[in-house]
Structures are given as structure tokens and as C-alpha cells.
Amino acid sequence: MKTVQDYIRTIPDFPHEGIMFRDVTTLFADPRGFRMAIDQLLHPYAGQPIDRVVGLEARGFILGGAIAHQLSVGFVPIRKKGKLPAKCIEEAYTLEYGEAIVEIHDDALKPGERVLMVDDLLATGGTAEAGIKLIERLGAQVTGCAFVIDLPELGGRAKLEALGMDVHALCAYEGH
């Protein structure tokens, strides 16, 4: 029986030498693989009250939209700075080569709402931490952080768990 990891393609030396890129587009393209991933991302949260699903740009939109549909709740995107049309709040975070900024509409979540945050990959945890901060600044509560892939050596899971987050990943790869 296939696992989610069996549907993920590895591309060596992308985007630069020494990186093993974990390509989830092959997972998304396969109907059984995609369904398996959505079902397994949802499983730990079955029966828990979730008011919204938040997806991190960009592959988190694909996963988050499908999960929100399954839960019959709304979907909220967290996007790179300058991509959302209405009034936003923003959060800066550190990247390997500098800094980036993500945003959320300032009216996207209501105080007290319970949020499941979703993305394809957890590496250093910088983007996810920025997403959590935005969600919490709007008064909502992150009930879980779900990822397809965890790269444990990069420390993202430890960073999020240190913030008190419940972290769920479908598979892990050594290295980066």
C-alpha cells in the first residue's frame, strides 16, 4: 500500500546545489495521493471544533482549500506582502538570504475563532511562526499546524512546539 511519501518527487540540486527539493505537485496531481494527504492531514483534528482553515502561500492554499471544504468552514490565505487587496496586517520573518513579509486581511478572522493552519512543508518554521503571530494578533487561536512534509534537521517543528503549537506532519525527510 502506498504512503503519501510515495507520491512526492525528489529533485536534486534545486533551487541550488546541495538541496533535495521535495516536490508535492506530483502528490497533488494524483487523485488517490491527494485524497490520502487531505484525509491524513484532517485525521488528528476529527471532532475538534475548527472555525477556519488558514493556508500559507502558495501550496498551503491548495491543501487548505481542500481541507476547508471537507470541514465545511471558510478558508483564509496568508500571502506575501502586496498580494491582498484590502487592509492588512503584516509580519516579517527571516529567510536563509534575508527577510520576507507575509500578510493577512485585518478582518479575515474574528477573536476567539479556532484555526487550523496548513502548509506543504515545515523547514525552519519562519513562515509558519509569522502565520501564527498574524492569526493570534487578530485574536484567533491556532488549534493545530498541519504539514505534508517535515524537515526535522532544520528545526521548524521544535520552534513551533516551543510556541505551544500542536504540529502534525505526514512524513519527514532527513537533510534539506
Image: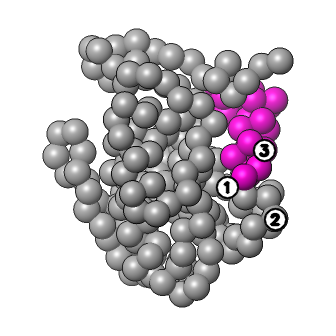
Name the one closer to the observer, 144 or 25: 144
N-terminal of the pair, mark 3 or mark 2, is: 3
Q: In percent of the image, x 49 and y 24: which residue is there?
A: 173
* Res 76 seen here: no
Q: Amino acid at mark 3?
A: Asp
| Residue that numbered label 2 is attached to | 47
N-terminal of the pair, mark 3 or mark 1, is: 3
Task: State which quadrant residue 7 falls in.
Answer: top right
Q: Say which of marks 3 and 2 sits in front.
A: 2
Q: Amino acid at mark 1?
A: Gly
Q: In percent of the image, x 73 and y 24: which residue is there?
A: 3
| Residue that numbered label 1 is attached to | 65
Name the one closer to the observer, 112 or 32: 112
Q: Looking at the picture, does residue 159 appear above or below residue 115?
A: above
Residues packed near mark 1 inside 10 Å, few (<14), some (14 to 19) or many (20 plus): many
| C-alpha separation, residue under disc 2 versus residue under disc 1 | 19 Å
Tell me the magenta residue range: 26-44
Q: In percent of the image, x 28 and y 19: which residue is there?
A: 16
